[in-house]
Image (cartoon, grey):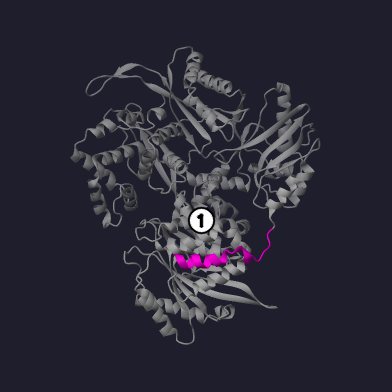
Amino acid sequence: MTLNREYIDKTDSKFWREIGVKFDAFNELTDARLDNELLVILSTLSLEALIELGTLFKIDNELNGKGEIQDSFKSLTKEQKLQILLCRDFQLRKKKTLRNFYNDRLQKAETKFVHTISQVLHLFYESQTNLIEVLAWYLWDNKGSDEQFTMSEKITMEQALKIPREGKDKLVNSLYKKTGRKNNYKVHSYATLRNENLLVVLYRQINDAPRPDFEEAIRNKEVAPVLFTINISDGTIQVKSSTKLEKEAIKEFVSDVFDCKLTLVSSDLFTEYSPEKIKAALIHGTPVSDAGSILKIHKISFRGSQLKNSPNLTLALKNIEIWPSVEHAYEKGIIEMESLKDISSLHLTYGDVNRTIRTVMKDDGNIIFLMDDSGIANHTKLSIDIEFKNRFGFPLNTVISNEKFDDGKVDKVDLIMSKISTDDFYTDETKQLYRHLIDENILNSINRREISCGTCGYKEVFEQSSSIPTVCPEECGTALKEKMFENYSVNKKEVYSYIKRTLKSLTDWSVLQDSELSLYDEKYKFINLSNQTSNKKLQVIVAENSLPSRVIRRIEKMLTPTMIIFIGEQEKNIENYNTNCIYPVTFGNIYIKQEREFSFLVDKIHDLLDRRTKTFLSDAANKALESIMKTAGTVDIDKKYKDKEFEDDVFAIFKDMFSNCEKWGKEMSGKAVPEGIFAMSWTRTNGNNTDVESYVFSYDCKLTKKEKGYDLGKDEQRKALDYVVDLNRNSFVNRFSRRNQLSAHIFISNRFDENNFSTMQEHFYKMLGNDYDTRPIFLDSETLVHMYNLYLENFEVIRDSPNVFKKNLFKLFTSEGCQLTVDDINKSFNIILKREQAEINVLSTDLVREEILDI
């Protein structure tokens, strides 16, 4: 039984030992020593990390100072304290693996954590098997690369998972037989990542001997891990093992189970090519080499296009080469060729051979053009390989560096920003990009020295300037080995400044004042842009980590087109953020494309989000309805639901009902203005005359958690009147409104103090005098929810009677009774929903269909 299955719903001492945690040592601590060990851990955490950890245990984050917060952890149960110690022990040396796994597995979590200790505990509380999977990926990350093979058949993750779940005995037997029946094997565990990578961890028993122990000698069945991954998306398998026979056994097993052929991918990185010649070959059909060829390309598929919504595009012809069509599409601006990853697949013919060549994008941004060569004679296969390289300038079934193209450089920058060590920098281009990032202060370089003892296993890392021992401090008397290496970290402050400078260089956009918003106890800074031609807004968030799903929903409800710039994330890992009013971009795009090209990218993003307006408006309004329903008629509200979110929810609903609606948010900060305004216009017919009725309303949102309701006392009366007076004097409101003023100022709250209704009315009438008659109107969230539900349920009827709808809502919002009730809404909608008033004739398609069926 795999660990995943054994510990699907439990944990015990064996579980912790299996994942390398010293459970017994911690479990035997006295209460006093347990508290002391916990204090040692807490004292190493920053204040931010401590507060974040406290949220997992519902510790008050408003305590004064680090000391008070540390003391509050003493109130935890012994089990909770032990869990912190165990998870802290587990996280050691696994920071990189943990971050990658956490961001993938809990990508859509309502709450996400930034600091490692909180991430480990979060993973553990979601499912203890998460830690088993983290350990598996840690073993994989720390074992050197090995041979990679392509599979001739595509499989699903469900099929792949049958190996560790159902086929483990067959796999173990295959290994046992292939290695001469000398070694015992077991499937220890398995792990998945991004729902496209399956990792299987096997243990090979290498010894069975007693081992000295402080209490008594123990039997130790020593093991060596054997690992292999199956990548579902690119159809590849990679095996990490120290023996050739084990690799052969796993290859044969996979080939047999999935009835496919495995083809070796060359491990050499191909870099000797000309981007210009490759582009000419793939766009114009111009061969890189003059050598003659019978190889023909009849079909080509591109990842994305310049058509609306950027669909994938396939061009195909029968018996004719496709290049004139590709060239024409390129000249018309329908397709682009920014890098090799723009090509999704090619279909070639070579004599009687027909094959599809698909491309695989590796995590490091490099590309493989894969061809299934099963059933092709060796001499024909060799001829295809030679002619393909002559034609396009790069080989088949080989990893090709994509970094000579700008889009490839983008991927490399993002890859560099996601790492902490230069160990994986193999090419001159990558090293050069790294040096540029260091020179521009975007990365901070840290030189370190690692010393290790070959006898006892002692290992420690020192800063370069530190004095280090030459003999093992564990007193085994061995001379220490020394290794120099270079680490680095992202200079977040400089990255933000770099992004800000680049945005300021855009010729068509003005950078407004930054704003800061607290979303679920986490502060986010917004860079606000305004288009100089259309005056439309675009807000930019710089994200160091993936964002929780509830933060994404919150941004969507703002209804402002938003670009999220991710630091240290690759494009394929952020695609799911491309939704509604949000478009994700990696920092590499800004750094490589810079002023001119980045300006085109920003315009393209804004145009795309603009086209999505209708879709994301309805979606945001529905999300707002779900949130605001929880405030209806109650003050018992989630403490994380703040007044700013209430304002966004109200605006989303109003914007869906009244298109001519504006929210005055971040860019109006500091100005004496209400939450927003909306206007209604409709036509009124009198005999042969048609008049246009136009009216303007302002509104203010008042969220409260007080049982008595929101207090609209003297300060609120003064502010509301100031809003009304200023807007009544506004020349545009004057010209637009048939009454040359606001018709009403609407207060919206989850609960009002009803004693304020008459005093607010009296204040308006007294202070406005005879010049204006703007009314105060009170709309509680329960009534607002009821009104919007009626609107959604009867949208088709309302759509066919737009003038009737607006006319009756105007009467509702200017009624004598200042407090709107559910009964008022019902009476108004009873009139609105009379079908006899329909202004637009609608064809009954049901009757049309019935008549056709009767013929």
x and y percentages locating residue 270 in the rendered image: 62, 35
Q: Secondary structure at mark 1?
A: helix
Q: Is residue 791 left or right of residue 309?
A: left
Crowd rating for badge 1 (residues with CA inside 10 Å; few <14, some 14–19, many 20+): many
Can see residue 559?
Answer: no
Give the extent of the magenta segment.
822-842
x and y percentages locating residue 409 in the rendered image: 58, 46
Q: Which residue is mark 1?
A: 622
x and y percentages locating residue 1 in the rendered image: 41, 23
Q: Residue at x 72, y 21 (%)?
A: 377
x and y percentages locating residue 488 in the rendered image: 44, 46
- Residue 133 drawn in magenta: no
Can see residue 691?
Answer: yes
Q: Is residue 268 left or right of residue 299?
A: left
Q: Residue at x 50, y 29 (%)?
A: 161
Q: Is residue 237 above or below residue 306?
A: above
Q: Nearer the viewer, residue 522 or 593?
A: 522
- Amino acid carrying label 1: it is Asn
Q: Nearer the viewer, residue 757 or 530?
A: 757
Helix, strand or loop for the magenta stretch, by majority: helix
